[in-house]
Image (tube, coloured by chain):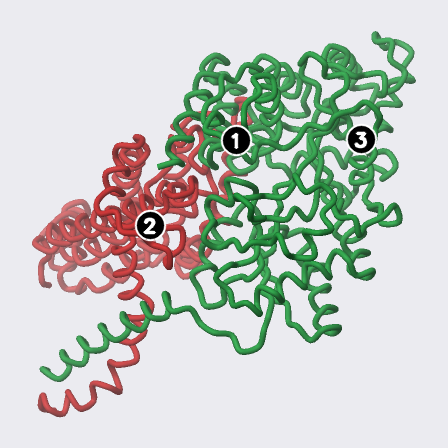
Amino acid sequence: MKTGKRIVAVLLTATLLLCLGGCFGGGEDAAVTVRYLNFKPEIADKYQELANIYEQKTGVKVVVETAANNTYEQTLAAKMSTDEAPTLFQINGPRGYANWADYCADLSQTQLYQHLTDKTLAVKAGDKVVGIPYVVEGYGIIYNKAITDKYFALADRKTGFSSMEEVNNFNEFKALVEDMQANAEALGIKGVFASTSLKAGEDWRWQTHLANLPVYYEFTKNKVDLTSDAVGEIAFEYAPQFKNVFDLYTDNSVTEKKLLGSKTVMDSMAEFALEQCAMVQNGNWAWSQIADVAGNKVKAENVRFMPIYMGIEGEESQGLAVGTENFYAINAKATEEQQKAAADFIYWLYSDEQAKKYVTEEFGFIAPFDTFGEANRPADPLAGQVMDWMNKEGITSVPWQFTLFPSARFKEDFGASLLKYVQGSKDWDTVVRDTVDGWKKESSAAAL
Amino acid sequence: MDKRQLGRWFPVFVLPTLAAFCVAFFVPFVLGVWLSFNRFTTVSNARFVGLENYIRAFTADSDFVRALGFSALFTAVSVVTINLLAFALALLLTRGLRGTNLLRSVFFMPNLIGGIVLGYVFSLLINGILSFWGVDITYSATYGFWGLVALNTWQLAGYMMVIYIAGLQNIPGELIEAASIDGASAATTLWRVKLPLVMPSITICTFLTLANSFKMFDQNLALTAGAPERETQMLALDIYQTFYGRSGWQGVGQAKAVLFFLLVAALATVQLRLTRSREVDA
């Protein structure tokens, strides 16, 4: 069996070498294709349709691959090491850029960047532009006007409001919510708020979105330079305000506190769609989820947005939280032609009339480019509401600063802490302390 | 057939499997071990850092050690519950009861369901029961632990049962008959005749349950996902979370994976040695 052994040895070494060569050499693609790794599973089909149209028009093939929910970074990491690495992908902001710095090409000369209305939105590294935002989104509290109107028509209500426009700070909001909860039966709802979904992986509305507000106010108050190391620590000064609104959500909810650990975002949206509750915190992307729920009772003209008030001074002029964590990036390790093909494709996507129609009507995007006019107002009711809030006189939007949160790990831990808090096995002071410590620890861990 | 001829047929019979083994197992394994000594985001931008990842796996936080403890406890309990249940079922279904074949299929079936689906179904069941007390499975690590044990037992017992049935059916009838003529009670027959003779099956089954329980991932992810606060996080899930939870920590995740492999391999070897020595020939 000497020959046998020798063959085994040769084969093992050969495959190992071959693979190493394959992994590190990088393959060459004859025909130029655009490989796009899409972040949004909800519109994957629409992207595919657009890709087909583009191929018919220009002959350039666009391969759209989609990462499942919450797995973009993993999928990207896996795909980047293959021969069929994406040439067009997305980063989620400055932190995402740090992760993919080697792979982000300079986009300052691309046509799409020239048309970006607010250049400060782009992700920059020195003079280089490495990420172009392709959609802005907004979140706040979504309410069902049919139910709030029903409340305003109640004879025995205890508050003096006659429309939601009159509610513009936390105290008023709290009074309204608590009285609505007291009248839940008359309103035909189980609770004012949809379940505060705290299942692991389903808690981003609190550990990321809601947490954005206190962090933003803290950084603004202390005039923190967001590009400096000063963001490596927070004091969580506005923790009491965070607690205000978080308690309001869980005290006046469809679901009992101790059962929140198994609730998903989809559960909450279904509760809202079936009119079991009047309000839910989420963003404009949620409209498709609401509309798709079987037996949906909420009418498009009745879904409205209001800002998240938590008791911070001056919040009367606060708008929705508007920003993006979706930035196009082009793979710097792809060939020149591939990079150009990718840049051409995204420019077409946001300038061609047919493509623009898709972007606003099918994707429901609020596109931040000057190629879009009033005629391209999104048909999606929540997206329209975001635009309205952005254009309101005297209202300032809250920017998305959760892209500065130190790591996914920090957010998971914060979410787990919040769950323990609602279950009653962790007191609020410990939650605050763990959050402050966690932020500091994760910031230094990520910098290692 | 002499040895030379055997060698001539080597490329036909062994080569395809060997090639597949290399591509699917050997290469990724070597690459994986090598990556555990590197800092990397993708395999193509790795930078050698020596033992740093291994040190960070233990010093950065207590997750790995805690997950190790949880996994060990879970495995110990699971091995006992699964094998006891499987053996009891096997005894019951080798007595010629009516409907034996149907029951064997029924007990085997859970094994055919995917882990994620099973975890989801069990989370509905367990939460449904716990809701009478107004809590859910995320409320306490104890609930999560026993939920996982129940799930794992339900899933694996049927499979092990099949192995035990095969073992029991292999026991020569004469031996059982001789035992009964000698006046051995049912308990004595079980203890002195059947058990020693199914030792090979016991070896296989403990080995399989040990390895499967220790490596469990999807059921863990779908049932508790580590809640509350990573207290029910097992090793495989911890490795996954380390790999993807922070940027720049992929190497640490890889290092944990290598340690995990060594642990599983060591455990399995020791266990195999121990049970082998007690096997008897019929």
- Which SS class for mark 3? helix
Q: Is residue A227 left or right of A438 when viewed as pictured?
A: right
Specify whether residue B145 is in view.
no
Chain for disc number 2 = B
Kindly identify which chain the residue marked by label 3 belongs to. Answer: A
- The residue beneath circle 2 is B89
Q: Are marks 3 and 2 in contact (CB under 8 Å)?
A: no
Determine the chain carrying the residue at label 1: B
Q: Amino acid at mark 1?
A: Ile
Q: Amino acid at mark 2?
A: Leu
Amino acid on which disc 3 is placed: Trp
| Dot 3 crowding, Cα within 10 Å, few <14, some 14–19, many 20+ | many
Among the chains pictured, the one given green colouring is: A
Is residue A171 left or right of B14 when viewed as pictured? right
Which is more toward the observer, B243 or B206?
A: B243
Q: Position of residue A384 (x, y in %)?
A: 82, 39
Q: CA distance from mark 3 to mark 2?
A: 65 Å
Disc number placed over residue B129 in the picture, else none? 1
Indicate left or right for B10 with B107 as reference.
Answer: left
The residue closer to the viewer here, A128 or B220, is A128
Q: Secondary structure at mark 1?
A: helix
Residue designated by label 3:
A389
**Residue at 65% in and 40% down:** A121
Q: Tell how many labels.
A: 3
**In the rendered image, which quarter is residue A441 located in?**
top left
Q: Which tint was used for chain B?
A: red
